[in-house]
Image (tube, grey):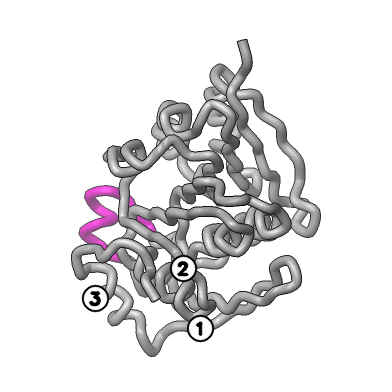
Amino acid sequence: MTLGSAGDGRESASLGGLNGDLIEETVALAGRELAVLRPRDSEALLDERAFEHEEYLPYWAELWPSGVAPARRVAARALRGARTLELGCGLALPSMAAVLAGGRVLATDWAPGAIALARENARRNGIELDAMVCSWSEPEPLLERGPWDLVLGADLLYERRNGDVLAPLLPRLVSDRGAIWIADPGRPPAAAFLEQVAREFQVASRPAAELPHVAIHTLRRRRA
């Protein structure tokens, strides 16, 4: 089975470093259970040099409730081939759910380890998933493959700078009639982000049914 673009070898090397220290969690989605591998200890993945230069922490290595909420929501939809992009996919649960719902999905993350594990999780669940390492500061590969019908993001707003980069990028990614779903557990920077994107998008926010502390913000382009 083909699991997306080949990459440059960093992904497989990164997964090899995780082998033997992974645990499996099971998530129920629309009558199906998905097995999700994740690192046992995300703090063990800290890279001091990367943190000093870019302050990147391995948040991708956790199975966050904000990832479960949009996965359950999208799993109940019929995407009918909708071109779907997940930003900051981490373990890629929403991406896998979107594939099962009939979407044509690209899962992306800045961390090679995340993409390696996303591909492995897809393989273990019998899901064909396209996945790619990509930074929001260099989004050309995402723009070249766009525009996207559905853009997913789970718990992306844990730092203000993330919202500052996302707000101008999202209008370039989504199609005119497309939608963006941002799941967030009430991170402090989320309010400023929603204020920024409201200039371009209509924003509808509602709590996730099973996880009321998580809100899913739906963004659609304003109509003239």
Q: How many marks overall?
A: 3
User: Vertically, is 29 above or below 200?
Assistant: below
Mark number for residue 128?
2
For the N terminus, the image quarter is bottom left
Report x, y in % for residue 108.
39, 54
Q: Amino acid at mark 2?
A: Glu
Residue contact at pointers 3 and 1, CB within 8 angstroms: no
Residue 197 visible to the viewer: yes
Could you give the CA–CA distance between mark 3 and mark 2, rounded to whole angstroms? 21 Å
Q: Amino acid at mark 3?
A: Ala
Per the image, the residue denoted by label 1 is: 23
Q: Camera-side residue: 178 or 162? A: 178
The part of the image, by quadrant, that contains residue 147 is: top left
Of tags 2 and 1, the one toward the viewer is 2
For the C terminus, the image quarter is top right
Direction from residue 33 to residue 88 in the image, left or right: left
Say which label, 3 or 1, has the lower sequence index. Answer: 3
**The residue positioned farthest toward the front in the image shown:** 80
Q: Amino acid at mark 1?
A: Ile
User: Vertically, is 150 above or below 176?
Assistant: below
